Image (cartoon, grey):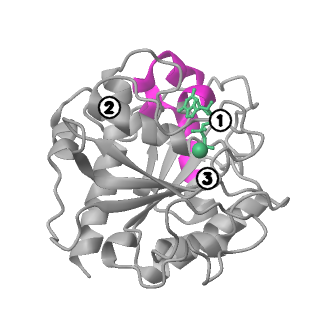
Amino acid sequence: MGEEQSKPACAPDHAPASGTLMEEWRKIRWGQKEDLQFVKDYQPYNKEVKELRVLLYGPIGSGKSSFINSVDTVLQGRIALRAQADAVSAKSFTTKHQTYKINKEGPGTFYPFVFTDIMGIEGPDKRGVCVDDIKLDMKGHIKDGYMFNPCSEISEDDQYYNKNPILEEKVQVLVCIIDASSSSILDDESIRKMRQVRLAARDLGIPQLVVLTKIDVACKEVQSDVKNVYKSNYIKKMIEKISVDLGFPLNCIFPVKNYASENETNDDIDSLILSAMKQIINSGEDFVNQL
Ligand SMILES: Nc1nc2c(ncn2[C@@H]2O[C@H](COP(=O)(O)OP(=O)(O)O)[C@@H](O)[C@H]2O)c(=O)[nH]1
Ligand SMILES: [Mg+2]
């Protein structure tokens, strides 16, 4: 393979890159229903845990809320719009610590995994969540409803501070959401913050993976057919760069296209979301069973 560029060779913010297609570099079975069934049937083996807690973090506008909606959409089989996605991401829309459950069959029944959406990580101007809050969140110390303050971490006497979190209140899977379409991918300050979060999670033994969103915006070939994702040289290079910048193994990075403007679901979009979800569940399950 030739000399790698530090940044993938494409990428104006708004025009998708037209990259070359190559032989499939990761295999996936498109449109199959096994992963959907797996996610639908999942129950934690460890009876101490009613639900897996998945914490989503990443830059503002990277698609955290949209990912929650997308999972909801895939499981319901129709477009869901609950976690409010923000079309104008000038500043983080989500400033509150909020946990989302996903309805199963009838009202009042939920899937045994929940997503916590937090304020975005932001670069040097300090508008985003502070890393110390994410660390406390991973340990279960932040309750739902807490309004993040970009300048300071939660104090122990805050009404939203949970002094004695039980296992279920702790984070079991950390998912870093990154936007594939922004030209610089990540600024240095975000990389620094995200590495800190990653190291803190590693010290706690929490499994982590990356969901790479907006692959349709990033790459023309993917925009025309999402099935080109694992043939796209551009997406491959980007995943390699994220792996180097943030220290994630390649097989922990999952490209997805979120449901953003669609009116109907699509099996291929579903397949990518489900393959990320299956890995999220499997790693969370391993984590709670090894405790
Ligand atoms: N085309 C496209 N748009 C996306 C995708 N994911 C998110 N978006 C859009 O990006 C914007 C920001 O997403 P949002 O979920 O609010 O980001 P958050 O700040 O991380 O929660 C919204 O307008 C979404 O509709 C994607 O995979 N493809
Ligand atoms: Mg959001």
Q: Position of residue 201 (x, y in %)?
A: 49, 74
N-terminal-most mark, 1 or 2 = 2
Q: Nearer the viewer, residue 49 or 205?
A: 49
Q: Secondary structure at mark 1?
A: loop
**Segment colored magenta:** 216-241
Q: Is residue 21 above or below residue 58?
A: above
Kind of residue at badge 2: Val
Mark 1 against mark 3, which lies toward the viewer?
1
Which residue does the image show at 60% across and 84% down from the upper left?
156
Kind of residue at badge 3: Lys
Q: Secondary structure at mark 3?
A: helix
Q: Which residue is mark 1?
A: 181
Q: Nearer the viewer, residue 214 or 29?
A: 214
N-terminal-most mark, 2 or 3 = 2
Which residue does the image show at 20% across and 30% down from the upper left?
32
Q: Position of residue 63 (x, y in %)?
A: 57, 41
Q: Which quarter of the frame holds ligand 1?
A: top right
Classify residue 266 as left or right of residue 151. Answer: left
Q: Which residue is mark 3?
A: 241
Which residue does the image show at 53% across and 42% down from the upper left?
65
